[in-house]
Amino acid sequence: MTAQARVETIPIPDVCLQRIKVSKDGNRVFCGRNNLVALERDSQGTRISHPGVTNGIQKFLDISTTQDDCLLVVDQKTSDLIKYDKKLRPIKRIKGKRTLNLNGSQITTTSYCGDDTLFLWMLGDNSIAILNPESMAYDIIHDFFGN
């Protein structure tokens, strides 16, 4: 039986908290929107206690964790999809179509069946892609939001 993490109040500096994801192994929590904050378990594995290094990942539309414990980030400025390794180093980047113009609105995404094996990526031009996070292969559905 694994040790249970004790939940405490954790100060998160200057973060607009719109997204939150937990790594598949349960050792890291990613949250934010304007800046990414990573919270990690301590060395005894019993407490999530401190902000981790996020290598300046800023302004993202969506995040997701993968089976191989990587992190997917949709960059708000470019709509690019970036895959980061466990140490949050970029390992693959796929270009989006263009900047997604939100006109002050927020994007709401919902968990869906299979979200641990597939990722829905908004490319910025009314299209979406259904992406396999491990292989980074994807199929595009053009004009999903109209043309």
Image (cartoon, rainbow, N blue to C red):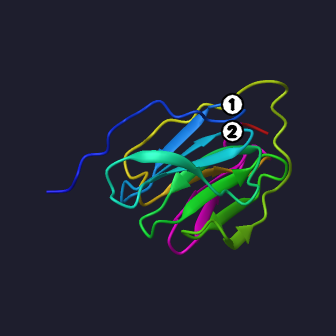
Which amino acid does the dot numbered 2 rest on? Arg
Image label count: 2
Circle 2 Cα neighbour tier, 10 Å, few/some/many (<14 / 14–19 / ≥20)? many
Residue 139 vertical placement versus 145 (above, below): below
The residue sitting at 71% across, 48% down in the picture is 127
Q: Which residue is mark 1?
A: 16
Q: What is the distance, in whole Å, between disc 2 and disc 1 at their CAs?
A: 6 Å
Determine contact: label 2, label 1, CB under 8 Å. Answer: yes
Q: Which residues are magenta?
A: 125-145
Q: Is residue 20 left or right of residue 68?
A: right
The residue sitting at 70% across, 60% down in the picture is 81
Q: Is residue 141 visible?
A: no
Q: Position of residue 106 (x, y in %)?
A: 70, 27
The answer to which quarter of the image holds residue 5 is: top left
Quadrant (top left/top right/bottom left/bottom right) for the N terminus: bottom left
Q: Is residue 107 visible?
A: yes
Quadrant (top left/top right/bottom left/bottom right) for the C terminus: top right
Q: Position of residue 71 (x, y in %)?
A: 56, 60
Under tag 1, what secondary structure? loop
Residue 132 within the magenta-colored segment of the rendering:
yes
Q: Secondary structure of the magenta portion, mostly?
A: loop
Which amino acid does the dot numbered 1 rest on? Cys
Residue 40 within the magenta-colored segment of the rendering:
no
Earlier sequence position, callout 2 versus callout 1:
1
Residue 33 numbered tag: 2
Q: Position of residue 9 (x, y in %)?
A: 47, 30
